[in-house]
Image (cartoon, grey):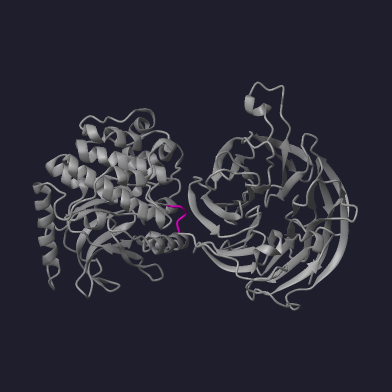
Amino acid sequence: MTTPLHAGDPRQVGDYRLVGRLGGGELGTVFLGRSRAGRLVALRVVAPELAADAEFRRRFSELTACARGVSGFYTAQVVGAAADGDVLWVASAYIAGPSLREAVAAHGPLPEEAVRALGSGLAEALAGVHAAGLLHGGLTPGNVILADDGPRLTDFALARLWDAAHPSRTVGVAPDGVFLAPEQVRAGAVDAASDVFSLGAVLVFAAAGRNAFGDGIGSDALLRVVTREPDLSGVPYSLLGLIGACLAKDPQARPRLGEVVGSLAAPGAGGWLPPTLRDMVGERQAEAGTHLRAGARPGRRALLAAAGIAALAAVGVPVGIWAADDDKPTSGTPSSPHGAPGGGDGAGPAGDVVSLTPGALVEVGRETGNGRGVAFSPDGKLLATGALNKVVLIDPAVGKQVGVLAVSRALGDANAVTFSRTGGLLAACYSLPPDLRSSDDKDREHGRAAVTVWDAASRREVITVVAASQGNLLAQPYAVAFSPDGRLVALGRDGRDCIGTAVVWEVTSGKQVASLAVGPGSNGTLGAARSVAFSPDGRTLAVGYGSDLKGAVDLFHVSSFAPIATLALDKTDPYGVTSIDFTPDGRTLVGSFGGVAVWDVAGRRLIATLADVNSHVGGVSVSPDGKLIAGAASAHSQGGGVVVWDLASRKGMPVTTGRSGGGKVAFGPDGKRLAATTDTAELLGAVQLWSVG
């Protein structure tokens, strides 16, 4: 219930005068506010201890900005927020009506037609949230408001923030855990299908007046969600099929939101609720009118569910709102008409960008392609590159081979290599032949992939992990990356019923912790996840992929491997996004797609195109200071080379390499060396070194 302001409460926040309290929770206090123009809002003031956390502030700013982009009749619009002052707050439109939880508690289940209208409106609202790049992840009867012209969905911009501030919190304490999807309970993973499951559970509550998986909180309640079938007694017969499908344990078996909308009736203005609930709404509207008068004192029964904030008890769920990341991605189209390396936003002469002095050309032997990868060790004393059935180790200071790590099981090249930032590890990925001795049919197929991890100093094998075939006999693994702490290793490869797959393992145990599908549709002939990278803080995994001249980068939360956002490109070369690298501060992501794209990570938008799709850039690397971008271009008969751009000015300087051009490229850890894979006149694999001045 609304209560008077406490003695220490603010009387004004932003442009809103506060007229009463609506509730409170871990994130802070919710007030009823009135704008200068007389509009009522539910205004949440963030708790001071959270507002003092810089990471919380960053995520608060990102999520509230994204939430303001949510449009749709059945959502409570976020109308204002502040993330840069002493007080953090967010305001959403005030909805005159009770929450679904309060309505059912007062008057019992809704009639069938009202349930149909409720389901249609909520499904449309969730579709609007998803279209803005968000996932709700915490839908309950408490954050559904019943207005006279239809339901309103709330709390789609805040619940995930509590999880960000308290990552150790578990779903076991969730007061509304019986509305979570099984995949959220098991692993914290959430996607659009998870919101469909929660919608089904909410509709059971509305139609039957009780929870589909019983009452209570804690592990027992969550276990019922995962292991038991829902209790649908009391649900109208005509709705059993649809609601039962929404509550399927398998996310793939659940209907899409568009199917839910198409199966139900939209709310009718003023007539979708039964008389008892219309009276409740009218009472709330009358109370709202009193708050619009200057100096009005809030009454005890003033809008308990304003903008859904009555659901504060549910805000503590760590899988609350999930951004699919978090922000709506912005697509970009390469803008340069130039085909030469360096064409793009900053095309043109750039002799003052940097000077590259050619060093040694180190031959590494036979190879089957120029996409093998190259990487410097963190101390810069070792350089690794792939070749046929081996990883070649090079001393970059003298430009000579100093060792070989044999990969006798590899079916071809070691396609990619990487060093861990800590722990002294080196990893390479490669294809495996069928294991005809295995009793597992997948092991007997072509298209298997493996990652071997070595101790770089002793050159001793630490572990080898194997990914089963994805059904593409011509498939290869393309990329490998360590998390910054060296705990995880990720592989980019082809996919089954998707463009590509990123597989993640724990290094110490070899346990597979994620298999992430990227890209819709079939992988086709060339489709694959060809690039993977962890953000410098280790919280985000980026996966680049492409097929049929289209490509993108998908971002995932490393803590849960839930999707964050997709950074899409309208046109790429046939291979999609083949290489990606973060700037040291993690704010910018650079990717090669034939051209070179630069994205703002927090804003999920393309901010620059340094080369167009005709530039044949296949690899990129960011300098340690984040000021330079190197791209390796392969122009075949025209020759290829390396281009170095100044990120601030977007000017580029091309340098010719070998006969077939560069494949992959890497800056040394001090920024004073640059290496790129290429080949010799005899078509043997090689690494070209430069000094950067």
- Tell me where residue 582 appears, x and y as whole percent: 62, 60
Front residue of 132/692: it is 132
Relative placement, left or right, of 332 versus 420 is: left
Relative placement, left or right, of 453 versus 116 is: right
Residue at 60 percent across and 66 percent down: it is 334
Front residue of 324/318: it is 324
Q: Is residue 297 visible?
A: no
Residue at 76 percent across and 53 percent down: it is 374
Farthest residue, direction right: 682
- Tell me where residue 74 appears, x and y as whole percent: 27, 55
Most prominent secondary structure in the magenta stretch? Answer: loop
Instruction: Tell me the magenta residue range.
Output: 323-327
Q: Quadrant of the N terminus?
A: bottom left
Tell how many labels: 0
Q: Is residue 369 magenta?
A: no
- Tell me where residue 20 appears, x and y as whole percent: 19, 63
Front residue of 422/228: it is 228
Q: Quadrant of the C terminus?
A: bottom right
Q: Is residue 339 visible?
A: yes
**Does residue 37 sit above or below 262 in this rendering?**
below
- Tell me where residue 369 appears, x and y as whole percent: 78, 49
Front residue of 97/693: it is 97
Q: Quarter of the image holding residue 181?
A: top left
Q: Quarter of the image holding residue 639?
A: bottom right
